[in-house]
Image (cartoon, helix red, strand yellow):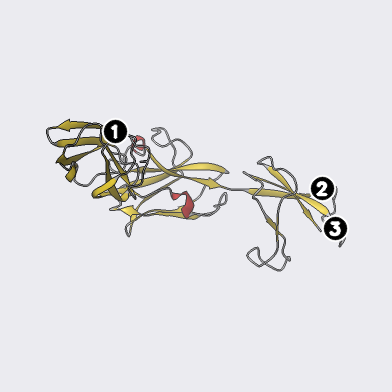
Amino acid sequence: GVIGPVSFAVVPEVPIRRVEAEFQVTGVGLASTNQVFLAPTCTAPPPDRSGSTTMSGVVLRWLAVPTVGGALLVCWCPHAPCAEAISIGEVSVVGPAGDAAAVVAYPRVGEEFDLHLAGFQIVGELTLQSEACGDAGAAPLAYGGVEDGELVVHAAVVPTPGVVNLCWCPANCEQLQNFEDGIGAVTVWNVGDVSMVAEDSGSVLAGVSVQLEVSGFQLGATSRLKLVSATAVCSDDAALLAPVASATGQQIGFDIL
């Protein structure tokens, strides 16, 4: 006869990201060696998954911790390795859908920036902090909460360059250790001094090549420099210069003519 799942249920009925849930799959000929996983699509092989499967009568029980929020498919495989998975339904996991780092482009030291993160039935609060998420002794740089269906941090300011963590708490957020779900990291940049090699006057001769050295944070081969008139602004169109010297992360060189 035909074997496979017929229906499924989830406990709790609305699972929460990073909180253990039980997925109960009912069907014919199921076994604890079957694979169950959550994914945007039921591709094979399945993504890395945690949790465990056990049988209770005709019910296959999968205990797992969803790692992302949003609408996901519940996928089933008869055995491992999984050659072909089938979708047995859809579940909506409460919480942020993914990494917030892509929401903001190159925030600068000492300058205000906002963060917005979407998901499903967004709840809870956010912190932006230098310490690891879940650190009870953390000193958050900014807090955020739910606004119009998004998790939002307003007017965050980071005083020093580096990488800061965005931490989410779904409930009981009075204690900092409950902000243990790291949902992203934001790199805060600082471009500092610009100096001309072998030139003290700050001026150069037309048609004579000169090298500029730029200091800052996480400078690399993909860094670019734009030269514009003193009466223009940096958003004006101008050629982008690639570096001519290997970057140390803190300093990089450009040739201009």
Amino acid type, mark 2: Val
- Give left or right: position of 72 versus 163: left
Q: How crowded is mark 3: few (under 14 residues within 10 Å), some or many (20 or more)?
A: few
Q: Earlier in the sequence, mark 2 or mark 3?
A: 2
Indicate the quadrant containing the C terminus: top left, top right, bottom left or bottom right.
bottom right
Which percent across, then down, holds residue 150?
Answer: 35, 56
Q: Which of marks 1 and 2 is nearer the N terminus?
A: 1
The residue most toward the left is 57
Residue 42 x, y percent position in the rendering? 32, 47
Which marked residue is nearer to the observer: mark 1 or mark 3?
Answer: 1
Q: Name the residue under label 1.
A: 51
Q: Mark 2 points at which residue?
A: 197
**Quarter of the image with the N terminus in it:** top left
Q: Which amino acid does label 3 sit on?
A: Val
The kind of secondary structure element at disc 3 is loop
Q: Name the residue under label 3.
A: 204
Q: Nearer the viewer, mark 1 or mark 2?
A: 1
Decide if residue 58 is in sight here.
yes
What residue lies at 68% left-to-right and 40% top-to-bottom? Answer: 248
Secondary element under disc 1, as helix, strand or loop, is loop
Q: Is residue 9 visible?
A: no
